[in-house]
Image (cartoon, rainbow, N blue to C red):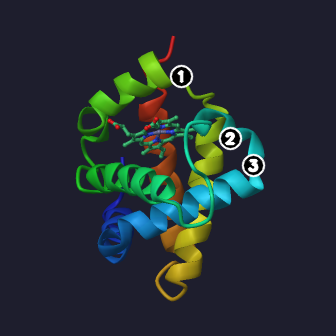
Amino acid sequence: TFSEAEKAAITGMWAKIAPHTDSIGAEALERLFCCFPQTKTYFSHFDLCHGSKDLHSHGGKVVKAIGTAAQHLDSIDSALSTLSDLHAQKLRVDPGNFRLLSHSIQVTMAVHFPNDFNACTQAAWDKFLCKVSSVLVSKYR
Ligand code: ZNH
């Protein structure tokens, strides 16, 4: 569960990101693939060149799902239930990769919103992205 201060930090930052989901998502993915090349194995069917349509459309989907979670902080499990099924039953991404993507998302936010993404906001987002990740791997068996 999140404190009122954490909720404010998460939704406040989400408001900044919301108009830029595709570009923020594309950059987070680009950082993920560049820093942790092993993560590219899941996306062999994608064009991973800088600025590609695939990066923008997939990045947008990922960030929009995070936005859904940000708007349902008291019920993230049910808000992401379908996506959790997809990751458990079809995608079966190694759970370790979620930390790497969460890191890449945080670096991207820090670069684009340096004044807003202070240490407290980062701490709240780290906790939030951990929760999102744990929901997405919760149905693995
Ligand atoms: Zn994931 C897909 C989200 C993580 C891999 N994803 C996906 C989608 C979404 C997501 C929304 C879409 C779905 C549909 O279409 O329906 N993810 C997400 C999130 C997260 C994630 C939110 C965290 C935070 N993923 C992840 C990771 C990985 C992945 C870490 C690895 C590395 N995903 C994936 C894949 C896919 C997905 C592979 C599929 C793609 C295509 O399209 O093919």
Give residue 57's position: percent from left, percent from top: 40, 54
The residue that mark 3 highlights is 36
Point out the residue furthest to the top here. Answer: 141
Residue at disc 2, CB closer than 8 Å to ligand 1: yes
The kind of residue tagged 2 is Thr
Is 19 placed above or below 63 here?
below
Q: Tag 1, which secondary structure?
A: loop
Is 70 placed above or below 91 here?
below
Residue 139's disc number? none
In 3D space, how far apart are the residues under numbered discs 3 and 1 (Cα atoms)? 18 Å
Q: Tag 2, which secondary structure?
A: helix
Does the residue at mark 2 contact the one at mark 3 (Cβ under 8 Å)?
A: yes
Q: Assess disc 3: are there few (<14), some (14-19) or many (≥20) residues with their C-alpha within 10 Å of its C-alpha.
A: some
Say whether residue 78 is left or right of residue 114: left
Residue lying at 49% horizontally and 17% vertically, measured from the top left = 140
Residue 39's disc number? 2
Q: Assess disc 2: are there few (<14), some (14-19) or many (≥20) residues with their C-alpha within 10 Å of its C-alpha.
A: some
